[in-house]
Image (cartoon, rainbow, N blue to C red):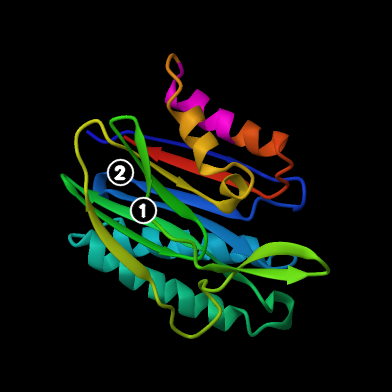
Amino acid sequence: MVHVVTLSQKGSKSAVNEDACLALANKGIFVVADGVGGGPAGDFASRTLVQEIEGFCIGSSNPEEDLLEAIQAANLKIFQAGQDPKLTGMATTIAAIVLRNESLLVCHVGDSRVYLFRNGDMSALTRDHSKLIAKNEVQKQVVTNALGIRESVKVEINRFSFSTGDQLLLMTDGISDAVDDRRIHELFTLSGRSTSEKLRSLIEESERSGGKDDKTVLCVF
């Protein structure tokens, strides 16, 4: 039986939480998304994505195929809605998994991440779609791929194995931009803490490190 714990918190820089997450445990589908865009746009983008996935997949007999179809459908819907001047520039990232017994499908667009914890070790299962740019002597990561930018979206897809005792973390960059991998591993492998307490510690660490973005983390185990 698969267990899931999620935690999401609005950051100080936004009026609403523009992150979204979805858990369809009976289908093995788990998703986090980070919407971007001014005003209501980022929230609209991430919510549209998870609504499309839920609609396509809740009764699915082929979760992997239907998830990928839902991502493309959501991308087109967000792109078309973005033609409205009020929503111009909106987009969303996605990090999603489909877990079926020992088979793990990981798909992502943007800089939301998936980590695997196995036997005390942590591995990143995604690679950020971003590049480092310098502006006014300040370096920052800029996302190079997201849903809603073009009429179709290229989704990076990878397969892995999943074993009893493994744990998966899906998170938005509100955490991973502020907390490095070493610290994520350290906090998540502390003994004597519940999964909920570990997720809370990741969010608190992000805030202590100055993270002002929305923060969402989902754990599957």
Q: Is residue 46 left or right of residue 194?
A: right
Whether residue 176 can be seen here: yes
Residue 104 point in image, percent of width and height: 24, 52
* Secondary structure type for disc 1: loop
Q: Quadrant of the C terminus?
A: top left
Q: Quadrant of residue 78?
A: bottom right
Is 12 or 176 nearer to us in this picture? Answer: 176
Residue at the extreme front of the image, as rendered: 137
Nearer to me, 2 or 179: 179
- Give the Cα separation between the discs numbered 1 and 2: 20 Å
Q: Which residue is mark 2?
A: 25
Left or right: residue 211 compared with residue 218: right
Compared with 65, 203 (above or below) is above
Which three-letter amino acid code belongs to the residue tagged 1?
Leu
Q: Which residues are magenta?
A: 193-202
Name which residue lies at 32% across and 72% down: 69
Residue 3 is situated, as x and y percent measured from the top left of the image, at 32, 33
- Residue 81, x across and y down, in percent: 59, 79
Q: Is 194 part of what is drawn in magenta?
A: yes
Mark drawn on residue 125 = 1
